[in-house]
Amino acid sequence: MGRVQHVYTHLTELWIVSVIRGAGTVSNSMLLYMVRKYKTPDHWYPSDIQKCSRVDEYLAWQQTNTRYYGCKVFWVKCMTPAILGHEATPEKVHHVLAEFDIILTQIEKLFLKDHLFLAGDEISLADLIAVVEIMQVVASGVNVFEDRPKLGAWKERVEEAVGSDLFREAHESILNIKEQHLISLSSELKKLFKRRLLKLLK
């Protein structure tokens, strides 16, 4: 389990760094490499082809769904006031939150269904990727679990599976991102982010 914890923590750190640098992505191939390199327990990326296909399905889907729309919420809610010095318009905030709400509904209906986890009844890489992306939205000040007891129960199971202390440690930086990172951005990065934000807010 120690190696799995290392992989999980490193994954989260990579995700935070990618967001700060504006990349907004962590390579799925990198995650698969780490799983194979550290020979993690089978449930993280199952050898059973049918179970594995469910994990692959989410990993492919999330890149243009959970990740894409979660990043939009993060940029509008968190980065706009940090970089531009003012909040995004209520209309823009409502729009990106409505988009992400649709994604959460799809996660529940297409993947979670009546399972304990996204790809079945055992935790997998799909759950780790999903929870990191959703916690990014939580870091933006949105309680996504408040009106979604099914999703909230899933998040609790993920936290229990990896360990509460590790879960809190892994998400500490993203949940405190304004204090720890945004205030220390270089002027070059702020200019880059400003151009991206102005395009996003049109």
Image (spheres, grey):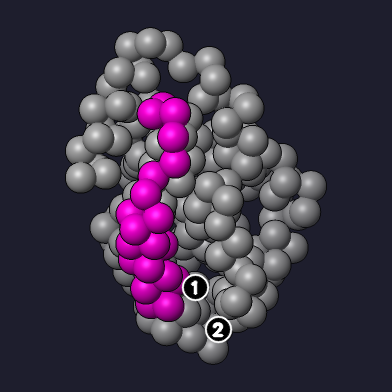
Image coordinates for residue 10, horizontal then vertical, percent: 56, 36
Q: Is residue 191 left or right of residue 114?
A: left
Image location (x, y in percent) of residue 13: 54, 34
Q: What residue range appears in magenta? A: 83-106
Q: Residue 115: which numbered mark, if any?
A: 2
Task: Say whether marks 2 and 1 touch (CB < 8 Å).
Answer: yes
43 or 79, nearer to the observer:
79
Where, by quadrant of the figure, is residue 131 drawn?
A: bottom right
Indicate the amino acid at tag 2. Answer: His
Secondary structure of residue under mark 2: loop
| Residue 157 placement: quadrant | bottom right
Q: Residues within 10 Å of mark 1 (few under 14, many from 20)?
A: many
Magenta region includes residue 46: no
- Magenta segment, principal secondary structure? helix
Q: CA distance from mark 2 to mark 1?
A: 7 Å
Label 1 residue SS: loop
